[in-house]
Image (cartoon, grey):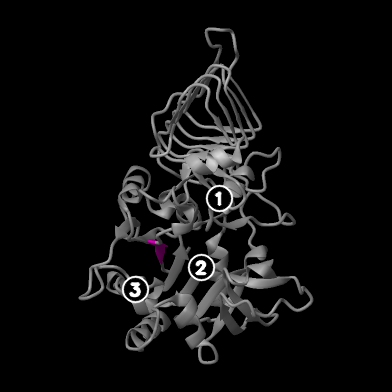
Amino acid sequence: MSDKVVAFVLAGGKGNRLLPLTRDRAKPAVPFGGKYCIVDFVLSNLINSGIFSIYVVVQYRSQSLLKHLRDGWQLSGLLKSQFIIPTAAEGQAGEKGWYRGTADAVFQNLDLIDDLGECTVAVFGADHVYRMNIARMVEFHHDRNADVTVAAIPVSAHLSTEFGVLEARADGAVHGFYEKDNHAPTIPGKEGQVYASMGNYLFSGRALQKELHADALRSGSRRDFGYDILPSMLGRAAMYAYDFQSNILPGETGGAALYWRDLGTLDAYYEAQMDLCGLVPSLNLYNPLWPIHTASYADPCAKFCYDKHGNAGSAVGSIVSGGCIFSGGTVRGSVVGRGVRITGDSLVEDSIVLDNCVIGAGCRIRRAILDEGVIISDGQHIGYDAEQDRHRYHVSESGIVVCSRRMAP
């Protein structure tokens, strides 16, 4: 990419709706897909797109995220413009050291960019799972000489209270913005859909600097891109929507629906992982021209063997990560993280098992999420008795049972 692009990855959200998975870790550090963390997707998209100047803005419970960045994302290039650097709030009087919103998070770090007036600034969220060639969005932004470009995708209209919604003309020019508004207009000709912001923005450096300085002086502002910055720019700045559906990756052809999921709830997190288990998964992790990078661990290969009673370990329609040993256990339609042990004649179905869990003999587990390091003793049943599960574990709205180490039997 010939034009200078500097990225801020906003990775500081609390992730309250993902509790208990976010009790001891930042939302972007929550594991996904067996070997990844959620943050790996936005970082991989940036690196694969040729954007190597990246600041990761951290905040709440950031230790696990910082460790993951250290283990998996230390660039070894010799160029000054190649870096992935975490940055935290410096702290302001009366604010307990926290950023006051997404816009404030970038505003506090603008001085990290030496040539702000000569570059494009990418502001991307860290809590979505998708694959995107951001270079195409940068080209779109420059071709239109835009002050700001917002990545957007059609979603069901009933989700308008979950996203910022755009009104845009055929050329992409934005003439309306509605932040989490149940009265947001639908797409013309598609009454059941709205044009949702993906929370990914490109700004010209000068425009961003001007808007953030003005917002810092504005009383009553939430210091938020969706609520404050973008609505205030309507009608006086060149704002465009980039249609994510037009984004084609190297090694893939158009035609298939592009995958993007907001992992804002436990149910959304669970369903996105189940999307990986089909014969032709809707999220393709197997394109060698667009790899999802992550930390590299010296795990041995997964092993499937017999237990002492002659029960064979097996996995069908599942993702199984390195270091796992299934000695007699059976896994179906599930995502299993690193170093998991399953013994005896246990059965795990339609579940997510995170790193280093141990499942004893004779267990039955279905539609469940086991957090890292959970030990399930012999003979336990999870996901079979709703009343018992609610008494012992955390249960989502759709009935997904979440077991953390504090809850394990």
Callout 3 crowding tier (Cα within 10 Å): few <14, some 14–19, many ≥20: some
Q: In the rendered view, does 52 fall on the left or right side of 261?
A: left
- Secondary structure beneath dot 3 equals loop
Residue bearing mark 3: 100
Q: Mark 3 vs mark 1: give the one in front.
A: 1
Magenta segment includes 8:
yes
The chief SS type of the magenta part is strand
- Give the residue furthest to the bottom: 236
The percent position of residue 93, horizontal first and vertical second, equals: 20, 76
Of the numbered discs 2 and 3, the one sitting upstream in the chain is: 3
Callout 1 crowding tier (Cα within 10 Å): few <14, some 14–19, many ≥20: some
At label 2, the amino acid type is Asn
Task: In the rendered view, tell whether residue 300 sits above or below residue 124.
Answer: above
Residue bearing mark 2: 200
Q: Mark 2 vs mark 3: give the one in front.
A: 3
- Secondary structure beneath dot 1 equals loop
Q: Which residues are magenta?
A: 7-12
Residue bearing mark 1: 396
Task: In the rendered view, tell whether residue 352 sits above or below residue 208.
Answer: above
Q: In the rendered view, does 313 fall on the left or right side of 99?
A: right
At label 1, the amino acid type is Ser
- Give the residue furthest to the left: 93
Q: Residue at x 35, y 50 (%)?
A: 65
Q: Residue at x 38, y 86 (%)?
A: 220
From the image, which quarter does the C terminus lie in?
Answer: top left
CA–CA distance in space, label 3 to label 1? 29 Å
